[in-house]
Amino acid sequence: MTNPSPTFPLFFGRNVKDEYGYVVGKILLIKEESSSKQVLIERGNGDIVSYPLTWFKQDDKKLTLLSPFKSKAQEFIEKLHIVWRKNQVVEELIAEKGMPPEELTEVEKSFKVELDQLRSEVQIFLRDIDSETKAYSLQIRELSSALIHLGIELKLDAVDRSLLLEAKGAVQKEMERVCLKKRELEEIHKRLDSIMLGETLEVTPDLGDMASSKQKGAELIVRIEDMSSFEAWQTSS
């Protein structure tokens, strides 16, 4: 992932959105004086939060906050790729018998320790993804229920129809966003599982581009879990 290097005056006081279109808040400061660059943002409720600069994408004179899960997953993917490649090189050197086997064995052991540690960290991260995915599933059910009740209210015709249609549109839009987030987390989980097993060693595409590429699709099909009245929702993006 390429780290942006924005000029602070260019972004001071500007609102920042995440990759799903939500307004995160207003930029107060971009600290670049240390190796750990941070962006300070004031949220709408007055809270001030700090995000690593590497979690942002700069495009057309604006900063977009990427998903923390994607940013962390990308870090793990890059680290796993490097460690797997190191082990591969050592195995090749051992097979070629071009270096003292004792030294190579020690190097191989150190790489395996590094890989085991990284695997443990990834497993913890995958559990966090599982928890977040379950939360999204619950949110989808709640939004589905809201759509059902709004549909009933429309049939009853007891409330201003234009207001009900506006509410329904807002719920459907949120449904699309939540389902996109859930599906992306599932794909991240699958990709990390694959790399953990050593099934892929090629350079992995940047996860930061995942949302934008999916939102350009013709339509998003959302399956509503445990809702017998609604087997599928289909909305245009």
Image (cartoon, rainbow, N blue to C red):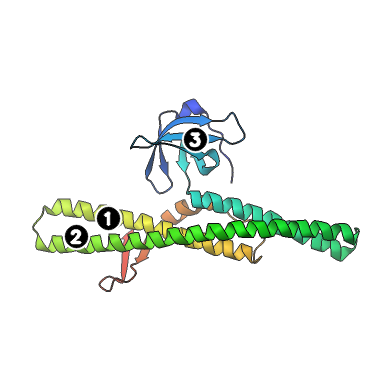
Q: Which residue is mark 3?
A: 39
Query: Mark 2 touching mark 1, by CB under 8 A?
Result: yes
Q: Earlier in the sequence, mark 3 or mark 2?
A: 3
* Mark 2 or mark 1, earlier in chain: 2
- Position of 108 compared to 19: left or right? right
The residue at 82%/62% (across/down) is 92
Q: Real-space Cα distance between discs 3 and 2?
A: 40 Å
Visible residue check, residue 121: yes
Q: Quadrant of the C terminus?
A: bottom left
Q: Amino acid at mark 2?
A: Leu
Who comes first in sequence, dot 3 or dot 1?
Answer: 3
Provide residue 42's location: percent of width, then percent of height: 40, 34
Which residue type does callout 1 highlight?
Val
Give the residue number, with chain letter if any, for mark 2.
150
Question: What residue is at 21 percent from the left and 51 percent from the top?
Answer: 166
Say what secondary structure mark 3 lies in. Answer: strand
